[in-house]
Amino acid sequence: MTTRAGMLIATGALVAGTVTALPASATPRPEPTPRPIAPLLWSDCATTAYPRLQCATLQVPLNHDDPAGRSITLALTRVPHTVKDTKDYQGPLLVNPGGPGGSGRTMAGFVAASLPAEVAGQYDVIGFDPRGVGRSEPALDCKPGHFDPVRPDSLPLDAERERTGVERARSFATACGKKHGDVLPYIDTVSTARDLDAIRAALGAPQLNYLGYSYGTYLGAVYARLYPERVRRLVLDSVVNPQGVWYEDNIAQDYAFDTRHKDFMSWVARQNATYKLGTDPAAVEAAWYRMREELGKSPAGGKVGPGELEDTYLPGGYYNGYWPSLAAAFSSYVNDKNAVPLTRAYEAYGEADAAADNGYSVYTSVQCRDATWPRDWNTWRTDNWDVHAKAPFATWNNAWYNAPCAFWPVDSLTPPDVTNDEVGPVLILQASDDAATPYEGGVALHRMVSGSSLVVEEGGGNHGVSLAGNACVDQHLVTYLATGRVPRGDGQAEADAVCETLPEPTPVKATANRDGSARPATTGGTVLHGLLGHVR
């Protein structure tokens, strides 16, 4: 699921939307007669990083149940196949970075460049901005500047703070209804899955191949349930638990992100020679919370208060490649009374821009529409204080992030049951300590999709494990895309294959850059997680 620089997290508590129990062979609705599809017109939109990238647009119905009605536009990208012999061509490979609300246009170039050339060359790698996102039209932006600093402290320690937070969430939901009320009933996962099938049809392909990360795993699972006969190969990396969309899944994130933040504190303690914050993880964590309290009184650089601090350190829960720079900013603030690196870290990892405003608008639109959320604020208050007592790092930050769903102007849908025994082998990739999509989600989907194969990065805490530098994980991905084969276990363990996690990051001093900040080196992992946007 999807930060502020790319978006944020999501959380809530213990009441999820109900799930429609459909027979394994059924589809949720009969398909109406589709409209004629014009051929895609591809044009060059190459970048320095991806010189073979092409772009196109596709008109799809706003309401797929009314094909003759209003159209919207999807923005697509492609890296075309290179194999000459048609027998070696494997069709389109659609890629999605998650969110909901993440732009996927650049993802095509990244995936094509990251796979071995002989495998990537067998596919047309297709990226797309889902409905409402990025270059697709209309693009949602409910309330520009909603995350401008300095926001109210996320902890509602008194009635006035709570009222401020509630009214802020309500005003965002109201703004969405006023500005985009005509499209909000159609910004949801099922509609987006039907867009995937329109893309498939426009490409002239009888089946599609798909690689989805994070929320993209749920989108892929829904597509496979709606159109099992049109799925050729399906890779789901860092899996949303389909049994908890979206309230329960978000509360599970709260606990997991708190654990991951403690992992970061332990790493900082082991790097005391560099960061000078002590060797006791509990003491290091206490220093972080003291920093948070001080920022509530005097925001760093006039823009990093407690909420912005949480936004800055949440990406560390998605990807430990950010730990060195985050630790350097922490150390500089505590030991040197220098807030500049912290401000720079916020600008790099936590600050919202227009793309983040768009992403958050789509995020709320999809999640609030997809499934039932509590409409009584007393439920949110009780649940989140209960969770905060055990997992204080980001619980209330995430509660406010999702709080517009308590006041959403469009009724919620009932999420489909994605249980599936009709698709061929599906490859599921999951890190055991992933915070954004906890391990239980990968196991749940593995059990729900007959014949699926689960590959686990044991001890890994990063969100998004393929094409991020782990050769073992990547080999399973490449073998599947090249041949359709998946690993099979002996039935004694949940996982069909286990890969060791990557080494921990190397510490970097805060003086690594002239401004006193420290930035991670560019690797496959940093590029991937930049594209995923460490979006909730």
Image (cartoon, rainbow, N blue to C red):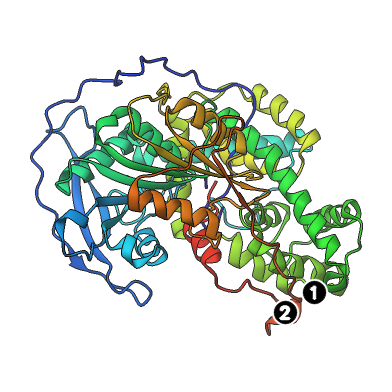
| Residue 305 percent coordinates (x, y) | 72, 57
**Amino acid type indicated by mark 1:** Asn
Quadrant of res 225: top left
Q: Judge whether 68 appears above or below 24 on screen.
A: below
Report the residue marked by disc 2: 516
Give the side of residue 80 with respect to residue 479, left or right.
left
| Residue 533 percent coordinates (x, y) | 51, 56
Q: Earlier in the sequence, mark 2 or mark 1?
A: 1
Residue at left offset 53%, top offset 31%: 246
Q: Tell whether label 1 touches label 2 (CB within 8 Å).
A: yes
Q: Residues within 10 Å of mark 2 (few under 14, many from 20)?
A: some
Give the side of residue 194 with respect to residue 312, left or right.
left
Q: Residues within 10 Å of mark 1 (few under 14, many from 20)?
A: some
The residue nearer to you, when weighing 95 against 11, is 95
Give the side of residue 501 with respect to residue 467, left or right.
right
| Residue 488 percent coordinates (x, y) | 49, 38
**Amino acid type indicated by mark 2:** Gly
Disc 1, SS: loop
Q: Judge whether 170 appears above or below 103 on screen.
A: above
Looking at the image, can residue 130 be seen?
no
Q: Judge whether 43 appears above or below 458 on screen.
A: below
Mark 2 and mark 1: span between their CA atoms?
Answer: 9 Å
Report the residue marked by disc 1: 338
The residue nearer to you, when weighing 375 against 488, is 488
